[in-house]
């Protein structure tokens, strides 16, 4: 394994076993399963996959609160040639805790997931680091997601907490994805999470409502926050050194409406690309709605090759921008402190909505010398 990456992993989440286990709810009584006591080595060279699956299987058979404990070490899962490597299904009152511990794998083709929480409730993941030695960001969708939240038939994940974790070189740190079931994952709390050298940071694809994110930092990540078809998010994220054409923040609508999102973004070191914040429509039937979106920006240290700070447009199935659309934006609120090159557009509306929506420009942004004088398809208030 690479020495530089080992240095990142060993110092990523330095928590003591005693302090982590004691952080449970007051009066909580339960079982702790130490993965090394069921056969995991944590040496980083040989796969621990079977032992870790056994630890999850033992936890699933216990009644009441269960903690799966990862003592210091690197738990290599082997080749990521399955859709999901570790799966916790329909579990309740589960804590997964790492004490200077890392889950790693090596992707060889396609997509995979290291830890999949499927239909789980009252779950926390704390103090773990994740890395994929086979991630190739130059190939779309070659790599492993670190943590995936999803549904199991008629049950979605609820009350999930992910905190104090580090992600280095993963396809996405946390992803919540729809699997065509009618239920939804909801009530998700993300806190103190750092992502580096990765494809995506935090993704919510037609699933994952009522999400709170605090102290989220993405460094050299193609896209930090990517929600669509979801509702009720409150996210604070810092994006640093994004040197790609990807937007740091991309809010979209494909099949389902996207609504009631509050995003506070701090962006530093954006090098080129079409935008820092994108609010894009791509509804396949042309009646998507993106509404009640609040974006508060702190933007600095961007170069002149960046085309837009904020961009709103509607795309066809081939990702071509449309001149007008029946899709709608409404109650979009933009504000913040933006320091940028005068060749970059502050706000660009690339597609006119046939039904005008409301766009609110906050006081700080309204004073910006590069604020456009017109916004096609919007009724503007300042």
Image (spheres, grey):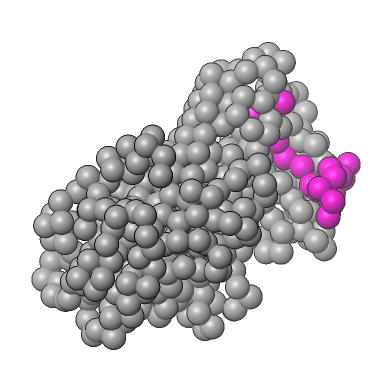
Q: Is residue 312 above or below residue 81?
A: above
Q: Is residue 135 visible?
A: yes
At 83% from the left and 55% from the top, the residue drawn is 317
Of residues 239 and 184, the one nearer the viewer is 239
| Viewport quadrant of the N terminus | top left
Is 75 displayed left or right of 79 in the figure?
left
Is 167 displayed left or right of 176 in the figure?
left
At 27% from the left and 40% from the top, the residue drawn is 11
Residue 319 counted in the magenta span: yes
Of residues 232 and 64, the one nearer the viewer is 64
Residue 208 x %, y %: 51, 63
Q: Quadrant of residue 358?
A: top right
Residue 238 x %, y %: 45, 35
Residue 333 x %, y %: 59, 39
| Viewport quadrant of the C terminus | top right
At 50% from the left and 61% from the top, the residue drawn is 79
At 63% from the left and 37% from the top, the residue drawn is 247
Residue 11 counted in the magenta span: no
Q: Tell me which segment is drawn in magenta.
A: 307-326
Q: Is residue 192 visible?
A: no
Residue positioned most to the right: 323
Number of callouts in the render? 0
Residue 246 x %, y %: 65, 38
Q: Quadrant of residue 326?
A: bottom right
Residue positioned most to the front: 46
Of residues 116 and 257, the one nearer the viewer is 116
Q: Is residue 39 above or below residue 105?
A: below
């Amino acid at each position: 394994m690479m020495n530089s990456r080992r240095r990142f992993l060993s110092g990523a989440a330095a928590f003591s076993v005693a302090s982590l286990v004691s952080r449970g709810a007051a009066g909580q009584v339960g079982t702790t399963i130490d993965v090394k006591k069921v056969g995991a080595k944590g040496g980083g060279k040989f796969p621990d996959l079977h032992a870790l699956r056994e630890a999850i299987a033992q936890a699933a058979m216990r009644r009441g609160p269960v903690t799966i404990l990862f003592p210091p070490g690197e738990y290599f899962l082997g080749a990521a040639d399955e859709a999901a490597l570790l799966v916790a299904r329909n579990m309740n009152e589960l804590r997964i805790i790492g004490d200077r511990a890392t889950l790693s794998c090596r992707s060889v083709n396609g997509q995979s997931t290291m830890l999949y929480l499927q239909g789980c409730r009252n779950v926390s993941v704390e103090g773990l680091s994740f890395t994929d030695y086979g991630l190739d960001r130059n190939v779309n969708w070659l790599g492993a997601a670190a943590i995936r939240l999803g549904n199991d038939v008629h049950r979605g994940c609820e009350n999930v907490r992910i905190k104090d974790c580090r992600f280095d070189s993963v396809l996405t740190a946390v992803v919540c994805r729809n699997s065509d079931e009618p239920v939804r994952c909801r009530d998700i709390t993300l806190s103190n999470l750092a992502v580096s050298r990765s494809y995506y940071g935090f993704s919510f694809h037609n699933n994952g409502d009522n999400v709170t994110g605090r102290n989220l930092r993405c460094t050299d990540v193609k896209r930090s926050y990517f929600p669509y078809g979801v509702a009720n998010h409150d996210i604070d994220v810092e994006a640093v050194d994004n040197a790609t054409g990807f937007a740091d923040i991309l809010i979209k609508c494909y099949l389902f409406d996207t609504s009631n999102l509050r995003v506070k973004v701090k962006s530093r070191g954006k090098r080129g690309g079409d935008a820092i914040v994108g609010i894009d429509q791509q509804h396949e039937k042309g009646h998507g709605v993106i509404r009640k979106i609040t974006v508060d920006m702190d933007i600095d240290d961007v170069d002149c090759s960046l085309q837009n700070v904020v961009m709103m447009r509607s795309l066809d199935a081939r990702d071509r921008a449309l001149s007008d659309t029946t899709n709608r934006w409404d109650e979009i609120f933009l504000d913040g402190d933006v320091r940028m090159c005068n060749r970059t557009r502050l706000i660009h509306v690339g597609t006119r909505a046939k039904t005008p929506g409301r766009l609110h420009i906050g006081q700080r942004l309204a004073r910006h010398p590069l604020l456009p004088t017109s916004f096609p398809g919007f009724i503007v208030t300042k």
